[in-house]
């Protein structure tokens, strides 16, 4: 008589460092190619269990050749953290306050992460040290900045003879920063200047600068690769910010989805730039919300609108294929029967890793997502298993969320 496979049969308990290491080895062994990005998602921000699991995972990955980590944080602010873990004398409190966007420096686990990275790097040669990256746009939920810093930094990096003539109009077109940073524009397209004549003209300037930088690479980059790559990141960000402002100025039923999609594109471009920068040094652990990293389509309710879009993970996976690995996480031991979270909670007393393809095959077609453990928690959807390689369920958390934004 055939036996029925259940989630309990599939779970790999993650009780200690040794069991976590074995689970990592087995997961990586299933890949046709070694990953250059291993993405670990979380279902909400601020619950300590998820970033602490990330920290444990990072220690195991360091033993397996990983040499960088990328967080859902401002791509430029991250340099403050990177400098600190490489020996800069900056005060740790300043690093946590200014080196992370979204107030993430106050999230439980991030202090420990920065301290661990600094200690790890202390007695290692520069080529063997960990690097810290951010891959998010320099925006907050309702605070989208002027493209001034990005445009001027990128343009002024170019030698004077190589600067596009359109830069001569830059200051006049930018105007006042307050024109761009009105927080009401996120929800009201009428107050955004993103579709104004000067905003459209700035997109031409941004494109000219990005093009000039790419064309200058053979003569400029060899002497200053780090400076050149940073200037290119600013040019890329300027274009992304101008697209974001244009999306804010565009009314329509899919407006929030378009904003999230533009942000996802910026995130994906930054992740691919990190892959290029880390080539030859080792793979990168990526940590962010599940919706940003999953290959399946993402859904979020914001401003009363149900938004559906493809996240950064879905975009990056198109380029990287098997070299992109996504592991989701979730929690809520008190979920109702008939839900994915109920089945996973019944399969572990603490936390366990499940192969997503095997789990998907073992679950009934009627399975559904459970309820949020706290407001803002997005329970992992069963359909999302089709776009994941594994899922870790954390059963021994009560879901207490640290209010890191205060």
Image (tube, rainbow, N blue to C red):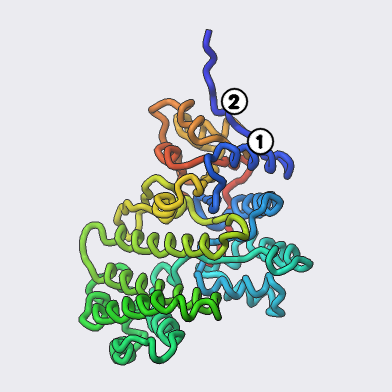
For the residue pair 329 and 166, the one nearer the viewer reads as 166
Q: Is residue 20 above or below residue 246?
A: above
Write down the quadrant of residue 281 in the picture. Answer: bottom right
Look at mark 2 in the image and give the residue it sits on.
Answer: 9
Q: Residue at x 51, y 48 (%)?
A: 323
Split into 4 quadrants, where in the image is the C terminus? Answer: bottom right
Q: Residue at x 41, y 91 (%)?
A: 160
The x, y position of residue 258, in whole percent, is 30, 60
Q: Is residue 160 above or below residue 191?
A: below
Q: Which mark is residue 13?
A: 1
Q: Is residue 210 above or below residue 10?
A: below
Q: Residue at x 55, y 43 (%)?
A: 331
Q: Residue at x 36, y 60 (%)?
A: 260
Q: Residue placed farthest to the right in the image?
A: 123
Q: Residue placed farthest to the front in the image?
A: 218
The x, y position of residue 239, in whole percent, is 35, 73
Whether residue 312 is visible to the viewer of this picture, yes or no, is yes
């Amino acid at each position: 008589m055939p036996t029925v496979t259940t989630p309990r049969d599939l779970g790999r308990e993650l009780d200690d460092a040794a069991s976590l290491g074995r689970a990592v080895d087995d997961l990586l062994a299933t890949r046709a190619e070694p990953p250059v990005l291993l993405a670990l998602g979380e279902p909400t921000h601020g619950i300590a269990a998820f970033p602490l699991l990330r920290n444990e995972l990072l220690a195991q990955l360091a033993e397996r050749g990983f040499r960088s980590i990328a967080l859902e944080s401002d791509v430029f602010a991250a340099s403050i953290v990177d400098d600190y873990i490489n020996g800069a004398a900056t005060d740790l409190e300043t690093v946590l306050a200014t080196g992370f966007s979204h107030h993430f420096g106050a999230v439980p686990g991030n202090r420990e992460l920065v301290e661990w990275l600094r200690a790890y790097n202390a007695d290692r040669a520069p080529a063997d040290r960990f690097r810290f990256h951010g891959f998010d746009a320099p925006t907050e939920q309702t605070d989208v900045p002027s493209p001034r810093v990005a445009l001027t930094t990128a343009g002024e990096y170019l030698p004077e003879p190589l600067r596009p003539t359109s830069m001569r109009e830059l200051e006049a077109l930018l105007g006042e920063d307050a024109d761009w940073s009105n927080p009401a524009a996120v929800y009201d397209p009428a107050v955004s200047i993103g579709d104004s004549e000067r905003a459209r003209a700035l997109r031409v300037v941004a494109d000219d600068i990005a093009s000039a930088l790419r064309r200058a690479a053979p003569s400029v980059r060899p002497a200053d690769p780090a400076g050149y790559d940073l200037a290119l990141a600013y040019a890329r960000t300027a274009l992304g910010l101008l697209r974001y402002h244009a999306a804010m100025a565009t009314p329509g039923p899919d407006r929030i989805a378009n904003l999230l999609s533009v942000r996802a594109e910026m995130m994906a471009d930054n992740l691919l730039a990190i892959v290029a920068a880390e080539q030859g040094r080792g793979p990168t652990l990526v940590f962010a919300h599940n919706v940003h990293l999953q290959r399946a389509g993402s859904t979020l309710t914001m401003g009363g609108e149900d938004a559906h879009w493809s996240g950064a993970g879905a975009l990056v996976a198109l380029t990287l294929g098997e070299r992109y690995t996504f592991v989701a996480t979730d929690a809520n031991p008190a979920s109702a029967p008939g839900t994915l979270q109920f089945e996973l909670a019944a399969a572990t007393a603490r936390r366990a890793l499940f192969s997503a393809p095997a789990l998907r095959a073992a679950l009934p077609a009627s399975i559904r997502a459970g309820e949020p453990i706290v407001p803002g928690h997005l329970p992992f959807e069963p359909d999302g298993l089709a776009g994941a390689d594994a899922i870790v369920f954390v059963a021994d958390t009560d879901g207490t969320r640290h209010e890191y934004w205060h």
